[in-house]
Amino acid sequence: MTGSKTGLSSGLKPRHVTMLSIAGVIGAGLFVGSGHAIAKAGPAAIIAYGIAGLLVVLVMRMLGEMAVAHPDTGSFSTYADRAIGHWAGFTIGWLYWWFWVLVIPIEATAAALILNTWFPGVATWVWALGVTFVLTLTNLFSVKNYGEFEFWFALIKVVAIVVFLAVGGAAVLGWLPGSGVSGAARLFDAGGFMPNGFGAVLAALLTTMFTFLGTEIVTIAAAESADPATQIVRATRSVIWRICLFYLGSIFVVTSLVAWNDPLLAAHGSYQRALELIGVPHAKAIVDVIVLVSVASCLNSALYTASRMVFSLSVRGDAPAALRRTDANGTPRAAVLASTAFGFATVIANYVMPEQVFAFLLATSGAIALLVYLVIAVSQLRMRAALGASRVDLPLRMWLFPWLTWAVILFICGVLIAMLMLPGHRMEVGATALLAWLIVAAAWLNRRARMAAPESAAARAQAGVTSSAV
């Protein structure tokens, strides 16, 4: 089933959505970035991942409840528009679009650095633009292309993680006598399980929390499948085991095998360092391939998600009308090209802008994940109250409503306050708040323009009638 000039395709197959929900947004943060969290908090980093994972499970449950009732490619932005107000849907939609546009240069540069080590004769900026261009093509022709690429990207990541857990688990159990490490003594033998105190765990939490952003993409993608409600229910119910297996399982294996104060942990990344200690040959090359696939996957999803969000904003009158058009395959090409244009601009900016300027641009997205989660929680709270008892038949419902919803809201507010108090995160909150206020002002201007448009049309029509009469 394809869309018309006003509708998206239903080209995503169940296997596409299933694999996207399982591992579509697992990026380099797990394979490499987790080393920084472990180096900061020690083995207790698994607590930080557990808290962040629990937050994501609860947020996904709330989002899943709303998405099952109203599948929409605008996802939480559309729900915020209905439940909180036009300004909220407008603001969070554009903030989310901005976040994914800024992800493009980060992932493109990460891929370029890996490719440059293999082919040093080609400059990194050429690789960055080349990777972005190739993945733009996958999004430009049909959503099926995006789904197919993500299916194989995600499958490679799943296989890689499962093999890592198997090899690492065998080393922990002492089943690899030839390896350099065995047992789980590393969890306690370098200052204890929490060597730097609970404050370090909280600091690591602020880092780990953002590695999960993107889990909600499945509710956006499911809107382009033949049976959105079924796919959303499956994806939401599977989020618990996905986090436990891929994230908590990986961190447990790494912290069991690698000392948290190992000087090479943060430099080489958690997966690579663990494989090196086990004695796996060519560990760096293996992890580089996995990371390359992961960043390509995240870049692919960034292009897709940004285009679908701006398409949804256009459909609601909150973005230029040209962006709502779709081709014969149901692909919003104008939205894809517009997002890609900004993506290319940010990739180029990463190389030509002063470092401080680009760092500030990145800081503007620093707290967007928390704002997205907060908006989802508030929207679910208000939408459930509006539905009342009329939707007891929903196949997916938030647990212990409204208490857990309120707990999530209070927790997110607490994290935002903590970030304001910490010098290392203060600029992120301030920059995101400044950007958010600018977009709120744009929402107000957009609302005024939309309200004035019918009056202007009526005045022009009246003027035409008067002129004819004369």
Image (spheres, rainbow, N blue to C red):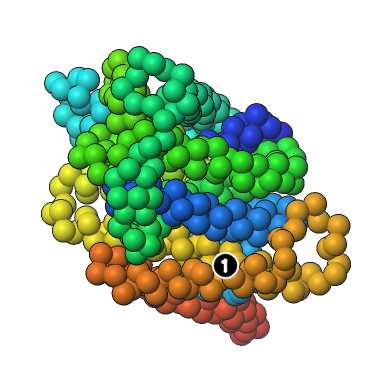
Please state the total of marks drawn on the protein image.
1
Query: Quarter holding the N terminus?
Result: top right
Give the vertical position of 293 relative to 302 (above or below): above
Residue at 44% of width from left, 48% of height from top?
46
| Residue at numbered disc 1 | 408
Q: Position of residue 404 (x, y in %)?
A: 65, 67
Q: Nearer the viewer, residue 220 or 390?
A: 390
Are there few (<14), some (14-19), or many (20+) residues within 10 Å of tag 1?
many
Residue at 45% of width from left, 59% of height from top?
369
| Left or right: where 385 falls relative to 218 | right
Residue at 20% of width from left, 20% of height from top?
119
**Which three-letter amino acid code belongs to the residue tagged 1?**
Val
Q: Nearer the viewer, residue 134 or 328?
A: 134
Q: Is residue 94 visible?
A: no
Q: Determine whether the residue tagged by mark 1 lies in a helix, strand or loop.
A: helix
Query: Quarter holding the C terminus?
Result: bottom right
Q: Position of residue 313 (x, y in %)?
A: 54, 59
Q: Position of residue 247 (x, y in %)?
A: 48, 41
Q: Nearer the viewer, residue 38 or 18?
A: 38
Q: Quadrant of residue 390?
A: bottom right
